[in-house]
Amino acid sequence: MSCEDDNNDLSFLDSIVAPSDVLANFQIAQDNSGLVTITPNATGAASYNIKLGVDELEPVSVKQGESVENTYDEGVYTIELEAVGLSGLKTVATQDLVVSFRAPENLEVTAEIDGSNPFILNVSAVADFAASFNVFFDTSNVDEEPTMLALGETVSFEYPGVGDYTIRVVALSGGLETTEITQVVTIEKPTELPIDFEIFDASVFNGFGGASNAIIDNPDTNGNESAKVAQIIKDAPEGWAGNVIELSAPLDFSTKKLITMDVWSPRPDGKLLLKLENQTDDTVFIEKEITLNGTSSWEEAAFDLSDISTDVEYQKIVLFFDFGTVGDGSSDWTFYVDNIKQSTVPVEAGEPLLFDDFDGNSNITTWTGDAAGLDTALPNPYVNADNFSATVLEYTDTGGTFANIQFVADSNFDLSAGNSVFTLKVYVPSSSVTGSETNQISLKLQNSSLGGNAWQTQTEIVKTIVLDQWQEVSFDFVNDNWQNLNFNGVDPDPVDRTDLDKVVLQLNGENNSSEVTGYIDDFYYGTAPAAEFPPFARDGFEGRGTITTWLGDDCGMDNAFANPFIDANNNSATVLQYDDTGGTFANVQFTITPNLDISLKSKFTLKVYVPSSSVTGSQNNQISLKLQNSSLGGNAWQTQTEIVKTIVLDQWQELTFDFINDNWQNLNFNGVDPDPVDRTDLDKVVLQLNGENNNDLVTAYIDDFNYHN
C-alpha cells in the first residue's frame, strides 16, 4: 500500500454542493418598536451576507448561528440572503419580512388646568405600544393642526376664553394602527373685580358702535408696571360707541361704593363716562362721568357711587370715552385702561376716641410697661418719609417672659357702630431682635377689673411686621381674624362684649425670653382716619422718599447732603441742600403725577434751616412754595399760585403752606385769578428762598417734605 497514492485522492471534492434550504427566522419585537432580529439558516452554509431590504443600508455578514438586528418602520421588506459554503459556493434566496404594528392599548390621558393660569391646559398621555401622540385641543375647530406629544412629555395650550372644550388624543403605533380618546375639559375664570388684564377672559370684553378693544402688552410702564392692559380704540360711526365688560356675578355695593381704574388718555380734558348696567335689563343703570388729565400718561380715575341703590343688581361695566363725539380710530382716540378696582369711599377723619401721637397730643394717660421698658417721649430714631414725628414711644423687651405695654381706657370699649379699629405705626430694628420668634405685633383687649387675671378675658389680633421700616398696622375686631383666649370655654364675639377696657401691645409673642426693641407712634382708636389720595409727595431725604424728580433751576441742589445742623429739632442724617450762588430766579422744584387736587389735600409741610453766614444782600428772609402747570414748559411760571412764609435764620423750623386757609397769591397772568382749590392743572412744586429777580446768595437746608391734608 502506498501513502503517496492516498494523499493525492481529491475525488471527495466532486461531492461538495452549494448551500441549500436557505431561509431566515424573523423575530419581531411586540412593543411596536420595529426591532427585528434576523437569524439565517441553510444546509451546508458557513456564513451569510444579508441585505436588509433597505437601500440605504449596507449588507451585513454573519457566521452560521449568528443573528443581525435592525429597526423597521411598518411595511413589507424583501430580505436577500446569500449563503456561503466552505468551498465558496453560494446560494441566494429572498424572503419577505412583514412588519405590522399593533394598535396602542390602555390609553390614559391626563388633562390638568395650569396652576398659574386658568386658561392653560396641560396634557400628557400614556399607552401600551404607543410611539407618540397627537393632541387636538378643540375638536370643534376643524382647521386645528395636531400638537405632537412625545412619550413622557407634556404639551400645553392657552384657550381664548371660558367654556367647555372637547380634546382628542390619538395614540400612534408607529404605523397605521391608532387608538384615540376624547375628553371634555371646562375652562373657567370668573370675571370679577379687581381686573388687571394679566389673566383675563377676553370673550367678555366687547366694543360696540365703532369702538374696539384688545388685551395688549403695556405700551407705557412709567406709572403703571403692569405687563398687560386693555386697549380701547374709538372709531366711527357712533358718538355713543363704547366698550362693555360682562361680569360673572353682580357687583356688591353693600360697603364698597368706589370704583377706580388706571387710565391712559392722549388728550387733555377728555371725558370718561362709567355706566353700570343690569345683566338683563339695560334700562336699569347708573352713570358717573369724570374729566381726565389726559397727559399721555397713566392717571387714576375714581367714580364715587355713594348714591347707588343696593337693591338693584349691576353686572355690566360700560366705558364711554367722550360720549357723544364720534371717534376717528386714530392715535388721538386710542386709550388704555387697567386695574379696575372696587373699594370704600374715603371719609374725612373725625376725632378718634383714643389717640396718642407721642408729640404731646394725647388723651391716653395710663401707659405702663409690664416686664418691658417704656418711654413715651423718645426722640424718633428713624425719621423718614414714612414718619416725620419728632417723638415716639419706645418699647424695650429685655427678655421678659410676658413682656408688653398697656393702658386702661377711661370707659369700656363699644366695638360696634364702626368703632372696631385700632391703628398704630411701628418700627422694629432688626439689630434689636434675638431668638427665632415670628416678627409680629399683637393687640389684645382685656377686662381690667380682674386685675392679675385680666389675661383670662382677652381677645387678640396678631399682625406680622417687616423689620427696619415704619409701617401702619390696623387691628379691626369686626373684619380681622381675632382670637379669644377661650378661657373656661367662653368664646364671645368681641363686638358683642361690653367688659373690655384694657389695651395690651406685645411684640414677637410671649412665653419666651428673646429680646426686641420697637418704636410705636400715632396710636388711635375709633373713627377711621381719612384715606390719603394720590398724588403722594413725601421726602425725608434718607433714600425712601416718593419724590424722584427733584432738580435745581439756576440753583445748586443735593438731595442727599449730610445734615450740618443736627439738633433736637431735626436729628435726620441727610437733608436737601439748596445753594443759590446768585441765580436771578434760583429755585428747586419737582413734578408729580397725577396732578394735585387741592380740594382733597391742601397742605405742604417742610423743615428749613438757613445759616445767616450764607446770606448776602437785603432780601427778606423767606421761603416761597409755588404751584405751577408743567405742561407749559418754560412758561409754567405764568400759571403759578404761591404762598410765602417768613423764616428765622440759624434754626430748624417746620412750616406749613395751606392753599385753602393761608393767604395764597396767583401771578394773575392775563387777568386769570382762579382759586387753587378749583384748579386741576397743577403738577409742579417750586421752592424758592429769599425771593427772585436778584443776584444775592443764600444756602438753605430742607427736610421732611410732605404733601397732605
Image: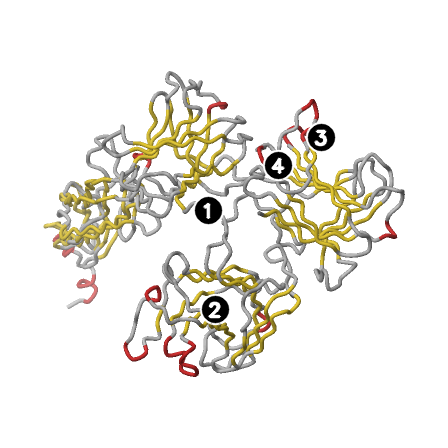
Earlier-in-chain disc, 1 versus 4: 1
Earlier-in-chain disc, 3 versus 1: 1
Locate residue 699 relative to residue 678 in the image: left or right.
Answer: right
- Numbered tag placed on residue 346 in the rendering: 1
Percent of width and height locating residue 589: 70, 41
Helix, strand or loop at disc 1? loop
Which residue in the structure is indicated by mark 2? Answer: 441
Percent of width and height locating residue 212: 37, 26
Mark 2 residue type: Ile
- Numbered tag placed on residue 683 in the rendering: 4
**Up-down relation of residue 468 to residue 70 (above or below):** below
Dots 2, 3 in contact, CB < 8 A: no
Residue 582 image-quadrant placement? top right
Frontmost of labels 3 and 4 is: 3
- Numbered tag placed on residue 632 in the rendering: none
Q: Residue at x 68, y 35 (%)?
A: 641
Q: In terms of depth relative to the viewer, which is nearer, 380 or 204?
A: 380
